[in-house]
């Protein structure tokens, strides 16, 4: 599954597939640690860190052997990206399910939105990203769209992302 990703200054409309509130009123997304490596002249080569994600497994992380490489704690949601992309065969593709991988600051913001809206599942947002390269790649301004763009039966056809198998980074199509 592709990752949801905005370039600085870009915007998109997305609908959350998961993101229900717990009985205590919080989001409880799966969380894991990942490394973002600079490889072949490019950032955004993502690798799950097994050592910090599941310390009980006893698995060692070769990337962590470099003390400069500190993994980030991230949380995983599944969204539908309503942008229109062109495939390699020049076909228009839209409403593509994507992994939405959020760092702590974004999760805090989403928790506030979810508390006000009664959960994120089914909510559609216009999301935009600031022009700073350092701004979150999933965007930092979320405006609710009045009604969900995706009816419930369709949302139920989308399988939530599986972080264990699907968090290997895919570059954006455009
Ligand atoms: Zn690691």
Image (cartoon, rainbow, N blue to C red):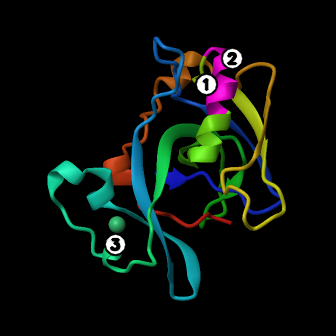
Please state if 56 lies on the left or on the right of 67 as rendered.
left
Q: Which mark is residue 117?
A: 2
In the picture as drawn, the residue positioned furthest to the left comes out as: 58
Note whether ligand 1 is within 8 Å of mark 3. yes
The residue that mark 1 highlights is: 120
Residue 44 occupies quadrant: bottom right
Residue 69 in sight here:
yes
Label 2–label 1 contact, CB within 8 A: yes
Task: Between label 2 and label 3, give the one nearer the viewer.
Answer: 3
Q: Residue at x 64, y 19 (%)?
A: 115
Q: CA distance from mark 2 to mark 1?
A: 7 Å
**Residue 93 percent location from the top left of the image:** 64, 50
Residue 118's place in the image compared with 128, above or below, is above
Q: Residue at x 56, y 17 (%)?
A: 152
* Helix, strand or loop for disc 3: helix
Q: Residue at x 72, y 65 (%)?
A: 134
The residue that mark 3 highlights is: 64
Give the magenta range.
Answer: 110-118
Residue count near mark 2 (Cα–Cα under 10 Å), binned few <14, some 14–19, many ≥20: few
> Looking at the image, is mark 3 or mark 1 earlier in the sequence?
3
Label 2–label 3 contact, CB within 8 A: no
> Looking at the image, is mark 2 or mark 3 earlier in the sequence?
3
């Amino acid at each position: 599954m592709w990752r949801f990703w905005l370039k600085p200054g870009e915007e998109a409309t997305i609908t959350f597939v998961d993101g229900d509130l717990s009985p205590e009123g919080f989001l409880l997304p799966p969380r894991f640690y990942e490394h973002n490596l600079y490889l072949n002249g490019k950032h955004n080569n993502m690798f799950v860190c097994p050592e910090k994600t599941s310390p009980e497994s006893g698995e060692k992380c070769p990337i962590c052997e470099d003390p400069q490489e500190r993994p980030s704690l991230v949380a995983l949601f599944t969204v539908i990206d309503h942008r229109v992309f062109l495939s390699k065969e020049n076909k228009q593709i839209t409403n593509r399910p994507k992994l939405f991988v959020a760092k702590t600051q974004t999760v805090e913001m989403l928790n506030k939105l979810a508390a006000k809206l009664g959960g994120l599942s089914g909510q559609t947002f216009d999301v935009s990203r600031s022009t700073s390269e350092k701004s979150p790649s999933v965007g930092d301004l979320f405006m609710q769209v009045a009604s969900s763009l995706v009816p419930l039966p369709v949302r139920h056809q989308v399988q939530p992302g599986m972080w264990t198998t699907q968090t290997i980074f895919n570059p954006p199509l455009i």
